[in-house]
């Protein structure tokens, strides 16, 4: 099968570029951290640390070695999944990060799913009758969703549904092992995170769908009596989703960024709150590990985006997109 | 007559002004006949097609016109009058096959969609078999493989065959082909025209062939209607019109055709094409008198003031032209 070979070659070339991108991003990150003035040991220990303790920490973190040597150590260790041991808690850094990753992933993906499930239908409805009062109303709604900062939405939801009405839990990620409790803890943060994206996605779907509906192949379907529901909801939507999926790939990185705010307000353990706390403690190794994780996540997300798009639009897989 | 269109008039509303795209166009096509609708760009040829299909742009309005298709009469001023006929009684082949198929669905899916409309409730397997058969009928090689292919994997000529297969599957009473070969290579043109003719032979439908090529019309059509600036200036059988053009415009159009054996000057810049000087009249303000007056080579005083009626050309009852020169004869 030529088609299967072509698809395999496409995926292989993408995978190679993924590995190179992760390596490049990590290198950049490493060098940026080393550009920060002052040495890590004294920043972390504060002005009243004894010189002995400073030397001890410096050696433990490998900061007394040359930059190329540090770089080699850093790369060779993270390649085997070894991010080192946290000097504050004495726990492996990988464990610390892995503990909170499921919470952040659950938050990001439930927000994304919510944004798609609500945003796409709003966009489709708006595109059905452009210029109508319904279209204008949905535009107003979407734009107000986009322009309200996540911080404000989070606080408002928190005050109304958790503090005021007591419908949903106030803080945390729920009891480990208790799925129902975890889901209840997920509702408010994911709504807060998704709201802006509902607005974005509905506007993007509307614009992209209107562009697609103006294309000539839509006229062909109309000429053959295909119902408007199938033309819009099936034939045009599939084509209109291609640019939206691409934007989602970039958006996922932003979603993780916004999760910092949401996780802090709802006191949810997660990558966002871990970075925030680690920066406050000047715990750079943990920040570094978190950022490596985010870069990896971002790249995997974009790889998935490319694959989804190749499925949606066969011209992309054929390299003609 | 299997198909007739009476007094079709279409206006386009462009912010504050109204352009009259068609004025009182009438057409007749017999069962199994091919009518060639010719005219320059902007004469309103495609507007006729889209008015019949009910697929005009939103700013277009049919101000008058009725169509009789398959024994039933349709009031074309109602936008959706012919909607029930789309994909059942009427089918259309479009100008640009590169753009007229959906790029993200397979050929098979798009063909089956036509059957889903014409034979609702039919089972998918039977539809696939019928679609494959239709691809074989339009002489597309390896129909089974084509079903799973996407439009970008096919050439322009192959895509146009797919659209013809769609038309074939919808078994229309009226097939409208809107410049079906304009976007294709000349070498493919004859093949595509042959498929359209063989579709007509299979189904026995009436065909409205919209084209600016008189060559195509004389080769493939039974009848011809000449459109100019939204008005029909002449109609008749191809033979009648070719031998005795009743309207100066028709004669000048035929004169513009370049004969393949014409002597060429050694210095190419000395080669001259015959052209019709002037431009189409202002679509916003129709000049008084004959619409072709400004460009006519035999016009006289009355042409500027009198709108000519249709007069019979020669003895034939079905050959008419709107020219004052015919008034005396």
Image (tube, rainbow, N blue to C red):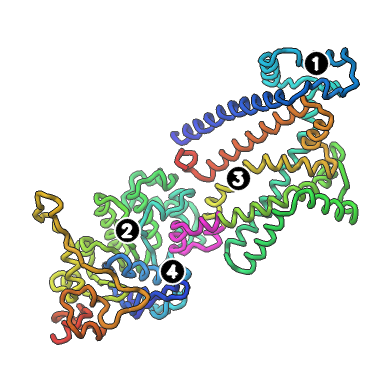
From what the image shows, is residue A120 above or below residue A70?
Answer: below
Of all chains, the one bearing label 2 is B
SS for callout 1: helix
From what the image shows, is residue A219 above or below residue B14?
Answer: above
Query: How many discs mark residues in the rendered view?
Result: 4
Of marks 3 and 4, the one in the foreground: 3
Gap between marks 2 and 4 measured at Cα: 19 Å
Return the residue at label 4.
Answer: B56
Gap between marks 2 and 1 measured at Cα: 78 Å
Quarter of the figure with residue B177: bottom left
Q: Are marks 1 and 3 in contact (CB under 8 Å)?
A: no
Which is the main secondary structure of the residues drawn in magenta?
Answer: helix
Taking the image as shown, residue B272 lies to the left or right of residue A29, namely left
SS for callout 3: helix
At horizontal 58% and vertical 26% (from top left) the residue drawn is A20
Return the residue at label 1.
Answer: A58
Return the residue at label 3.
Answer: A247
Q: How packed is label 1: few (under 14 Cα within 10 Å), some, or many (20 or more)?
A: some
Q: Which residues are magenta?
A: A208-232
Return the residue at label 2.
Answer: B180
Of marks 2 and 4, the one in the foreground: 4
């Amino acid at each position: 099968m030529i088609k299967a070979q072509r698809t395999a070659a496409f995926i292989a070339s993408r995978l190679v570029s993924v590995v190179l991108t992760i390596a490049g991003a990590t290198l950049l990150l490493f060098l940026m951290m080393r550009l920060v003035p002052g040495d890590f040991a004294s920043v972390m220990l504060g002005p009243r640390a004894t010189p002995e303790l400073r030397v001890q920490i410096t050696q433990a973190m490998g900061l007394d070695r040359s930059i190329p040597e540090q770089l080699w150590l850093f790369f060779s260790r993270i390649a085997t999944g070894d991010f080192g041991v946290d000097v504050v808690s004495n726990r492996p850094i990988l464990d610390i990060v892995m503990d909170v990753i499921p919470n952040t992933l659950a938050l990001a993906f439930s927000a994304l799913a919510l944004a798609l499930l609500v945003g796409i239908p709003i966009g489709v409805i708006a595109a059905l009758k452009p210029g109508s009062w319904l279209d204008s109303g949905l535009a107003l709604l979407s734009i107000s969703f986009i322009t309200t900062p996540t911080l404000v939405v989070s606080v408002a939801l928190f005050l109304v549904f958790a503090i005021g009405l007591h419908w949903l839990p106030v803080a945390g990620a729920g009891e480990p092992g208790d799925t129902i409790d975890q889901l209840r803890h997920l509702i408010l943060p994911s709504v807060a995170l998704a709201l802006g994206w509902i607005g974005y996605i509905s506007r993007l779907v509307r614009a992209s769908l209107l562009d697609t509906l103006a294309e000539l192949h839509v006229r062909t379907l109309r000429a053959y009596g295909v119902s408007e529901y199938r033309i819009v909801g099936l034939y045009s939507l599939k084509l209109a989703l291609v640019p939206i999926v691409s934007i989602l790939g970039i958006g996922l990185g932003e979603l993780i960024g916004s999760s910092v705010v949401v996780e802090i307000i709802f006191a949810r353990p997660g990558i966002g709150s871990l970075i925030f706390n680690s920066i406050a403690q000047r715990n750079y190794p943990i920040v570094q590990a978190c950022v490596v994780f985010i870069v990896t996540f971002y790249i995997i997300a974009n790889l998935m985006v490319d694959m989804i798009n190749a499925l949606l639009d066969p011209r992309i897989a054929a390299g003609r997109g | 007559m299997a198909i007739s269109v009476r007094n079709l008039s279409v206006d386009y509303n462009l912010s504050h002004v109204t352009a009259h795209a068609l004025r009182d166009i009438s057409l007749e096509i017999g069962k199994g006949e091919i009518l060639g609708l010719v005219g320059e760009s902007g004469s309103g040829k495609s507007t006729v097609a889209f008015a019949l299909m009910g697929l005009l742009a939103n700013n277009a309005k049919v101000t008058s016109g009725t169509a009789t298709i398959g024994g039933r009469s349709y009031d074309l001023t109602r936008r959706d009058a012919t909607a029930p006929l789309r994909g059942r009684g009427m089918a259309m082949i479009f100008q640009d096959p590169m753009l007229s198929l959906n790029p993200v669905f397979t050929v098979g899916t798009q063909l089956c969609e036509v059957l889903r409309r014409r034979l609702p409730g039919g089972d998918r397997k039977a539809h696939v078999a019928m679609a494959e058969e239709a691809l074989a009928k339009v002489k597309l090689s390896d129909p089974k493989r084509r079903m799973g292919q996407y439009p970008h994997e096919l050439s322009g000529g192959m895509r146009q065959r797919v659209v013809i297969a769609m038309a074939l599957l919808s078994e229309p009473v009226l097939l409208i082909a809107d410049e079906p070969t304009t976007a294709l290579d000349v070498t493919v043109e004859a093949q595509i025209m042959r498929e359209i003719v063989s579709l007509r032979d299979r189904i026995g439908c009436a065909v409205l062939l919209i084209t600016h090529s008189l060559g195509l019309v004389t080769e493939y059509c039974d009848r011809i209607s000449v459109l100019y600036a939204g008005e029909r200036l002449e109609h008749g059988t191809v033979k009648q019109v070719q031998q005795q053009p009743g309207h100066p415009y028709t004669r000048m159009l035929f004169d513009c055709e370049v004969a393949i054996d014409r002597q060429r000057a050694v210095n190419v810049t000395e080669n001259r094409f015959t052209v019709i000087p002037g431009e189409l009249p202002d679509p916003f303000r129709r000049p008084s008198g004959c619409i072709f007056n400004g460009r006519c080579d035999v016009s006289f005083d009355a042409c500027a003031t009198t709108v000519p009626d249709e007069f019979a050309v020669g003895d034939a009852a079905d050959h008419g032209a709107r020219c004052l020169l015919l008034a005396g004869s």
